[in-house]
Amino acid sequence: MNGRRAAADRLDKPREACGLFGVHGHPQAAAIIREGLFALQHRGQEGAGIAVACGSGIQVIRGQGLLTEVDARTPFDALNGCSGIGHVRYSTTGASSLRNVQPLTGEGADGMWAVAHNGNLVNAGALRRARQEAGALFHTGTDSEVLLHLLVVPNRPGGDRVAGALEALDGAFAFLLLNGRQLMAARDRYGLRPLSLGRLGPAWVFASETCALEQVGATHERDLEPGELATVDADGLRSTRFAPEPPRRAQCVFEMVYFARPDSRLFGHWVHEVRVAHGRRLAREHPAAVDCVTAIPDGGHYAAQGFACESCLPLESLFVRNHYAGRAFIVPDAAARAQRADRKLAVLASAVRGRRVAVVDDSLVRGTTIRRRVAALRQAGAAEIHLRIASPAAAHPCFYGIDFPTRGELAASGRTAEDIRRFVNADSLGYLSPEGLVEPLADGDRFCRACFTGDYPTAMGSDDKTSLDNDSDLGDSHG
Amino acid sequence: MNGRRAAADRLDKPREACGLFGVHGHPQAAAIIREGLFALQHRGQEGAGIAVACGSGIQVIRGQGLLTEVDARTPFDALNGCSGIGHVRYSTTGASSLRNVQPLTGEGADGMWAVAHNGNLVNAGALRRARQEAGALFHTGTDSEVLLHLLVVPNRPGGDRVAGALEALDGAFAFLLLNGRQLMAARDRYGLRPLSLGRLGPAWVFASETCALEQVGATHERDLEPGELATVDADGLRSTRFAPEPPRRAQCVFEMVYFARPDSRLFGHWVHEVRVAHGRRLAREHPAAVDCVTAIPDGGHYAAQGFACESCLPLESLFVRNHYAGRAFIVPDAAARAQRADRKLAVLASAVRGRRVAVVDDSLVRGTTIRRRVAALRQAGAAEIHLRIASPAAAHPCFYGIDFPTRGELAASGRTAEDIRRFVNADSLGYLSPEGLVEPLADGDRFCRACFTGDYPTAMGSDDKTSLDNDSDLGDSHG
Amino acid sequence: MNGRRAAADRLDKPREACGLFGVHGHPQAAAIIREGLFALQHRGQEGAGIAVACGSGIQVIRGQGLLTEVDARTPFDALNGCSGIGHVRYSTTGASSLRNVQPLTGEGADGMWAVAHNGNLVNAGALRRARQEAGALFHTGTDSEVLLHLLVVPNRPGGDRVAGALEALDGAFAFLLLNGRQLMAARDRYGLRPLSLGRLGPAWVFASETCALEQVGATHERDLEPGELATVDADGLRSTRFAPEPPRRAQCVFEMVYFARPDSRLFGHWVHEVRVAHGRRLAREHPAAVDCVTAIPDGGHYAAQGFACESCLPLESLFVRNHYAGRAFIVPDAAARAQRADRKLAVLASAVRGRRVAVVDDSLVRGTTIRRRVAALRQAGAAEIHLRIASPAAAHPCFYGIDFPTRGELAASGRTAEDIRRFVNADSLGYLSPEGLVEPLADGDRFCRACFTGDYPTAMGSDDKTSLDNDSDLGDSHG
Amino acid sequence: MNGRRAAADRLDKPREACGLFGVHGHPQAAAIIREGLFALQHRGQEGAGIAVACGSGIQVIRGQGLLTEVDARTPFDALNGCSGIGHVRYSTTGASSLRNVQPLTGEGADGMWAVAHNGNLVNAGALRRARQEAGALFHTGTDSEVLLHLLVVPNRPGGDRVAGALEALDGAFAFLLLNGRQLMAARDRYGLRPLSLGRLGPAWVFASETCALEQVGATHERDLEPGELATVDADGLRSTRFAPEPPRRAQCVFEMVYFARPDSRLFGHWVHEVRVAHGRRLAREHPAAVDCVTAIPDGGHYAAQGFACESCLPLESLFVRNHYAGRAFIVPDAAARAQRADRKLAVLASAVRGRRVAVVDDSLVRGTTIRRRVAALRQAGAAEIHLRIASPAAAHPCFYGIDFPTRGELAASGRTAEDIRRFVNADSLGYLSPEGLVEPLADGDRFCRACFTGDYPTAMGSDDKTSLDNDSDLGDSHG
């Protein structure tokens, strides 16, 4: 039903890696961006910011927390201009301090720049050190700042400078760049992260997901190509390549399985349709002799719908969410977080007692939350619990901007399905097969499935992610 | 799936009338009450408070907003004591100012009292004026303050004073009362509002709904009887009657249809079971030749589940909730509120296009939100939209603590089902029959169905609710 | 130089007992009151509030902290009306919670009332108990609430009711009362607390001190008489007596010595003139063979000026105040408070070294702060330190609204001047004589000097102040 | 009496340019720095921050407003380490946004750096552009950031790099620099801005003024020399020169006249002694036949003391400060600011009426506040008002970090003393002569008196201050 789940539920899910929204040519750029980011809030709840070009300068408002919280403290309405970019953040690299909230800004020889980034650069550490050795001073702990510095490397003509900077980056990214005259958008050469182009009357709009285009009333024109750099200015939109068409695209399949909102059209597919199809295939691959089907809220919902429909079984809601769990509880440690997750999801005991239940979730990463859900059903008196996962076993870490657990934390890393079944204490466990995963995707080979297969699309560098985490900023305080 | 819906969704639903939680005999009374109120937050989001008896005095922390918000500003942990009561508030009478947040407190000749109230007193105005004419000074605009004043009327022995005060009240109420030695609980003579009794080890617990007993790990012993006054003190629990057993109970059926959490056991029934049964009956009364069934989130969910199951139709989620709509947006007027409701509920257009859809909701009160939902489905290309309401047409105002619209605002007041169908622009509209409403309730005649039938359980006074609304308090400001 | 001192300096001074300001007949009543209270902030920094009559109701905004802090959180501009009263509070009775911040309001049979009080009622406990036994419910821990309750005692005609209520009160007070039609002002029968009447164009204005009249541009017409009740309504001002002219007035001499702003005209005298005269007399009574005269900031300033002038000695500033000590430091216990007082007052060591210094302060109550000042001068190398106090030894507690130390805490209670000299470690100590105190006051016998003489103007009841302090309110929390 | 005055009083005074405090070798570095900055708050109230070295990294807490306000939001106690620097800020260049609050931090090839700056660099624009053309990215609008960038310019050995960077700077500065191993302190080659060195047990301490050394209990060892770079690390303190001993020092005389706290020892002189001496000399240069002498609070106090003493006239306090004027009033424009200044300074009318008054202030820059003070005295009935200024006519702008008015705003620029007398409406006006200014300073030629004489100590560049003000940051928002 609800395509999104609150932060507390996502404890053993990979965390998203930010949402982007940009607009050029709209007199109320900040208001449009705010509305667009509102539809992307599921991609990051730790920080939000908007930068708007204003004359030759750029003004920015940023803050920690939800978009609405930042707006309540410092209204985005104060930003005047026709062109701007916005960002919602889920920290992947860089500690969670105000200094790391995006868009990042800086002033080089040719003026101000702002940048917003979704993804993870695998060669950021090397590029950062190289720039530092050339005399650059870094102000944040994010890999995203590297691009800002590459943009101002001297002795390169302007347009080429941006393409050259992007070409130097390895890893996963969607970028929005802003200067006093232009809005630019780019997507990594593999197409790992999504970025869509839309129109809103005469204005051009960019968004991480099409649900944000819909939110502002824009039409979805097309997705950016992998390796494409789109530039919008007074002369309109033009497109170049900073990298050649890749031999094989590597669109992140986890966006489809879990991250994206079900009403988005992602990489050419309606997200909810793919998830329902996954559930149907899962029912054929791992049928269950049960009395009813239930979803683990909220991620498993559409797969459960497909599973129930294909199985001719009733789809029932056996979990009750407490929507008011809220952010205000201070939850310092992991144990407290786990408890909180439980507090806000009750079980309909009378509907569970004595029944055989098929429980569907979108994925099983650490397995710890699912384990608690199974235990809750068992405590409520379920006769049998058959767990069905609408994606294959996730056994390999991600290096492309998804805050995946390390190999050791992945439930499926080095363990059999039977090991995991015992761990979560289900009566049976069925994963969707890798073939089932791509079945509803006619272009399944264009997807990165490395977390399921270990087949990574780029040559991994030896970059140590942690080298970027020496964040120096305990906090900026704002009256 | 989720039994609760956020405030913004409830615009054309009646609003709830507060949640109560009390405990006696637990060394961490405040923490237990906080946890219990947490599970009752769906009953009121405008204010929260806890009062704890401490020596001969009573300490109280109260504030506007969600329980977690109040706690973040003034931690309830500061309250020390073994006995206490708590309240979450949805204003029914009295403007929404801090002064009106409960528990209310006052000091009479025999010491401090605190009171928490769920319901609406129909003779509050008259009682208030009588006390004022006897020299009483009122400090809030709530009807609940009347009870505090009746408690301290002189020339009556102690125990009788409470029973006498309760006896004087007409209308709907569940009350929790606290003084330095005792915790008391009472339920009106008709049984309009719910109140359950539980045990938590040696401690006694009271809660508006059993889901709160479950939340704190307490067992559900029984519900309070209509007209019962339960008193807990160092000698344990004892029970008396302040009013005789009524000839006919009048338990609020809207609690069953909409207010209560689906996992509560209410008036002897599991809420979600009743709602599923309503959906099944609705499918038999008003079958629909459609391709799928969908619920209007979140209230219609269990009825939709029953409808789909009985119809052998797939249950699909065609609406996508934005969970981050949040409270931080300042939504000053009705037009803005309507817009906000839309912003946070998207339609899965690709799953709607060209299909015949049965849309199920729990009730139709004003009809304005449902109308927007139907319009959204139509805009997404639905071939046919068949609206099914899992309760009868609500045509009569409520005087018992539910913030029901006035007669003129009720869609069904003086209008035929066909009028309403045209208003919401559905292809067909079917209401559950009054007989269907009580079918799953073996004791259906013990329910107040006045909003559907116009048959009110008490002799209505001429009390003007507005006479209580002369709230004088623009605001208390707290650093 | 500055007549006021910050809270932290006042640790061993008596604390003030609130400031009042009222206006009738001005279209911007709230703005005028805010401005007037601004000039009375020295009389209380713990809370501030304004109540304005609006139609038949009364609206009030109150909060903890400074006037400007309350205004920043909830702007007083929201109060519309032509008549209103305001209050700044220094708690004397009742703990420092929001619930006790004035103006207090309540609704009786004849509508809403608001009350603001400066002073202390010695028979409040007995009156409170009597009303409680008659069925009244008290909502605050303040003695001031007693008047509200007396105002609504039935079976008395309206005008008489107010006079009768005031007549019942014993102790010190200035009161401002507001209902939907009238603004009333009263001063206790002894004249202990000040209250002045002014005009601002056609509007009538009341203020605790004339400096507040000046602040709003009003003229000072006269002071209220002891026992006078002034009433302003649409028919203008009229005055009655609720108590006969007292045989002897008892104006608080500590107002003159310490509380009032030096630019106020108090009880018929310019405050700074009296203080300079006290310093001159002190120089004659206790001359000092020193190199210079210095004041303990800020209270001793005008007396030091008189002392230096009379002695033909240079007046030097040997202490340097840190104006930014601020309120933001959380100072939980007495030790920390003492340390803070030191942090913010440095000594000009190079100007002190080797010199003989006369140090002048307005009064010596506990003596602890003065002791630290003397120690600081000594540490800076002063050759001799001669302490001169511009009032007699304070050896008797005050029961009239001044937060005086108990007898045991009074330095001069049961101790000789020599004991105190040793305690503060001065080379000599001279107090102004009781005769010197009244010398500049032609009407010296109209002043209450009980704290210096033990001669109290009223028959003290056995009222236990603490019986009012059972404050139940840990805090109201405001979002 | 009080050497400092609140922000609102300083409207026509030059504004200060920040305070610095650093410590190396103390286990509670942050607490010591906080205490030291507390005594320097008069040098800047717009922002405060502390950076502490912690392992190889640096942690920083910064915020807008007073030190106590920043501390209340984000306690400095969270900073652990033995070495650190702190800053209080009065914006001279760079708009007043959080991004510009110091210490500034950045990471270069050799790790993290933090910098705190008091002063103004006259060649900052040119240096910034040069670094930007070499590929540097600037993150703030402050001139101070230039030094951070110069520190990381490659191809220079470590120690030389710092000295080389400092050498490149022209203008006024005191700098504190921090990296993982070292604390460094430097003072510009002219000695324009003060910086003192102290010891606190084994720890080394640096402070803008000695009053801060006193505050933490440190001894004052000596002042840094102009052109000196002091470095403290595990090997202790060592000192080098980055610039040769200047032919002529240029210590800012305005520090002596107005900025510094009277209890500081500045450039070898006790500040209050110099100010008293100025007042004495002024009395000889411009005697006044008056009845009394008064100071304009607070700046004129010590000069007035000297004036009165030399003239054998009584020193009287004719102005009364309202200490509660506070920061909470939002004062958007100049007119409102002017009104606020008046609200908080009342005149003792009864002491002024009919008398001839000598009014002493430390300086006359714009003249607008003085004019209002004279008008207030005149309105109170002063017979004659003789204005005496304890410094010469300020006719020339300052380029060294003092936020002086532009030439057009300087009252004395292009106007005669008679013009100014008429402007401020005094009966006579006397300025201290330039000779009188240096009389109490044996080394008077080592002072920059450019604002009085137009004789600037450095070759002024054509640097446009405004080029640094393209601040892009509307605000960072912090939950």
Image (tube, coloured by chain):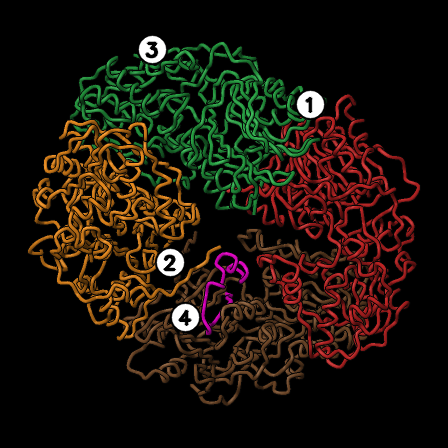
Chain colours: A green, B orange, C brown, D red
Q: Quadrant of the N terminus of chain B?
A: top left
Pointer 1 residue: A157
Bin the neighbour count of mark 4 within 10 Å (Cα to Cα): few under 14, some 14-19, many 20 and up. some
Mark 2 crowdedness (10 Å alpha carbons): few <14, some 14-19, many ≥20: many
- Do the residues at discs 3 and 2 belong to one chain? no
Chain identifier of the residue bearing label 4 in the image: C
Q: Position of residue A222 (x, y in %)?
A: 45, 24
Q: Quick one: SS at disc 3?
A: helix
Sequence-earlier tag: 1 or 3: 1
Asked if marks 1 and 3 fall on the same chain, the answer is yes
- In the figure, is residue D380 to the left or right of B475? right
The CA span between labels 2 and 1 is 62 Å
Q: Residue at x 84, y 72 (%)?
A: D428
Q: Give the crowd class for mark 1: few <14, some 14-19, many >=20 residues within 10 Å.
A: few
Residue A62, x across and y down, in percent? 54, 39
Percent across and percent down for residue B389 are: 18, 41
Which residue is under mark 3? A435
- Amino acid beneath label 3: Glu
Apparent side of residue B193 relative to residue C89 in the rendered image (left or right): left
Give the foreground label among 4 and 2.
4
